[in-house]
Amino acid sequence: MIKKHTSKKMSAPVGGNPLFQSHKAKDDFVSVRKRDLERLTTEVMQLREFLPRVLNSDLIETLHKAQTVHTVREHLVQEQEQLRQECLHLQSRLDAVQTECQKEREEKLLLREQLWQSGAELQQQADFCSALGSATCGLLWKCSTSEDTVECWLADANLQSFLFIATQTLESFVSSLDMEEKTQTEDHNSNEHQFVLALAGIITNLAAVSCGRNFLSTSAQTLLDNLMKLLTQIKHGVFPKLKVLMLMALYNVSINVNGLKHISQNPGLMPLIWTQLNDGHWEVCLHSLRLLQSVLLEEEALLLLGSTLLNPDLQARVRELTTSEKPSLKLAAQQALEDLHALHQGWGSKQNTV
């Protein structure tokens, strides 16, 4: 044991603290084994040697990175928790939207079923109205063959309204008529077609009576203009029965002086006649020729249409129809051709006189 000797104890000064002096006296002596002192000295020397090697910049940077990673990890944990909460919120909203979507889908299916039922009911009503209109107009068509009936209708103020509705119906039918498809699939026995044919037949029978022609020529001129317009809208070979009735109505009106004057003043008359003369149906051509003859026989109409009637193409087309196998069409074409020849000769003589 190594003993550390200190100076002899001195007497405490007057007024000194004896406790403090005793404690200080004990701290003056430290007993340490030589082996432990050597070991401690060795460890201190080793620490002085190796500590700078361990505590270098790489270790400090690694510790800093570890601290940064720890911070980032905590931030990611917080973000993950936030995302989890948002996911739960979105999931709840998705469930609510899916529930609402399912409810709307069920309502849509219900509405679709109701719409289908309403459509079926509407179609039934339309078929009923079409059948009723066809039957009613068919009866009126037959009644209109009587002159007394026509005179009775003319005495009623409702005839003007009837003709207005008839005009609208014909316009609607022609505008919705699929010209190309119905040339092969046209059903003339359908209620719709019979209804339209009956309307046109009633107008034709009205024009067949003297008082009816006068009424149409003076009070229903818009109807006459619409008939001429609709005839040019229907393509060749489509619905010839309707064309024939409309041409017959115009021909009947042309017997009236006022009617022929109104028709002749329409710039679409000659294009209409030319178009119908080139139709593939022989009855359409026949009644077009009769309308042409009615114009050729009236001097006032000749003054209005003289230049267009002298068209050589018109005369050539009429000459072609004289070779028709239909006797009535052939005869009408021959008569019209003679009238055209007379018109040419008369027009030539007038030119020579002038």
Image (spheres, rainbow, N blue to C red):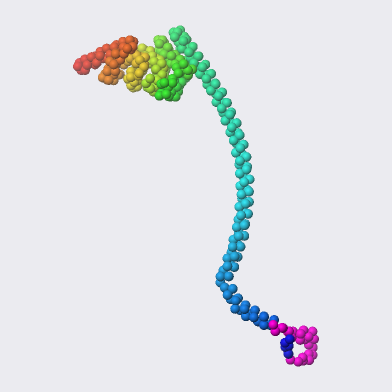
Q: Name the quarter where the C terminus is drawn.
A: top left
Query: Residue 145 in the image: x percent, y percent?
Result: 44, 9
Q: Nearer the viewer, residue 285 or 342?
A: 285
Q: Please provide the residue range marked out in magenta.
A: 7-35
Residue displayed at 58% across by 65% down = 65
Q: Residue lying at the far left in this picture: please name it.
A: 352
Which quadrant of the view contains residue 25? bottom right
Image location (x, y in percent) of residue 192: 47, 19
Q: Quadrant of residue 341?
A: top left
Q: Please name the residue shown 46% across and 20% down the image.
A: 169
Q: Is residue 354 visible?
A: yes
Q: Is residue 78 left or right of residue 273?
A: right
Q: Quadrant of residue 118?
A: top right
Q: Is residue 308 magenta?
A: no
Quadrant for the N terminus, please: bottom right
- Residue 337, image x and y in percent? 28, 13
Give coordinates of residue 246: x percent, y percent.
40, 16
Compared to residue 240, the image places residue 66 above or below, namely below
Q: Residue at x 61, y 54 (%)?
A: 80
Q: Is residue 34 above or below residue 317?
A: below
Towards the viewer: 6 or 128: 6
Q: Is residue 333 left or right of residue 240?
A: left
- Magenta includes 28? yes
